[in-house]
Image (cartoon, helix red, strand yellow):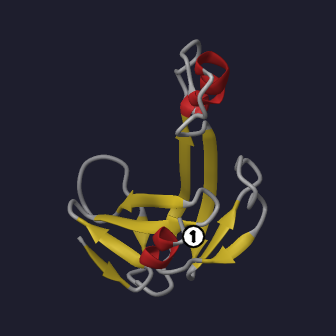
Amino acid sequence: MGARGILRTIEGGRLAFWCPGCNEVHQVTVGEGEGPRWGFNGDYDKPTFTPSVLIRSGHYVPGQEGRLFWCTYETRTGDKAPFQCSVCHSFVADGQIQFLGDCTHALAGQTVALSPIDTGAQDQ
């Protein structure tokens, strides 16, 4: 695993980037191989991935109806949930991340520059 530009390279053809909307790392798989793959422009300083990047968790994941999730954790246990049910849907183009309107975080509908992955992780 290593950092290049604003991305982190991970074995198996995966590239990771810091998502300021979710305050966590997202990753996509590029190149040849099985499973979903994203196009990548090869620029580690101003990456573009195609198509959009869609990250869903908890009850937003299709087929998870009727299960217990993080959004009801505090009500069920009295403790603050360690995770959230969420949607992060974005286009990453020329080093910018454009958050689409279906995101559940505060940056929905905004476009911001990606920052180096290690910088974002240190802000936690």
Residue 46 percent across, percent down from the top left: 51, 85
- Locate residue 21: give its quadrant: bottom right
Residue in view at x 46 percent, y 61 percent: 25
Residue in view at x 57 percent, y 82 percent: 94
Up/down of 89 relative to 10, above or below = above
> Which residue position is annotated with label 1?
92
Residue 47 percent across, percent down from the top left: 48, 79
Out of 78 and 83, give the one closest to the viewer.
78
Up/down of 12 relative to 61, above or below = below
- Locate residue 117: give its quadrant: bottom left
- Locate residue 33: give its quadrant: bottom left
Residue in view at x 25 percent, y 48 percent: 34
Q: Secondary structure at mark 1?
A: strand
Q: Amino acid at mark 1?
A: Val
Residue 63 percent across, percent down from the top left: 52, 21
Please tell me how many numbered marks the rendered image carries.
1
Q: In the figure, is residue 51 to the left or right of 39?
A: right
Residue 84 percent across, percent down from the top left: 59, 39
Residue in view at x 40 percent, y 86 percent: 5
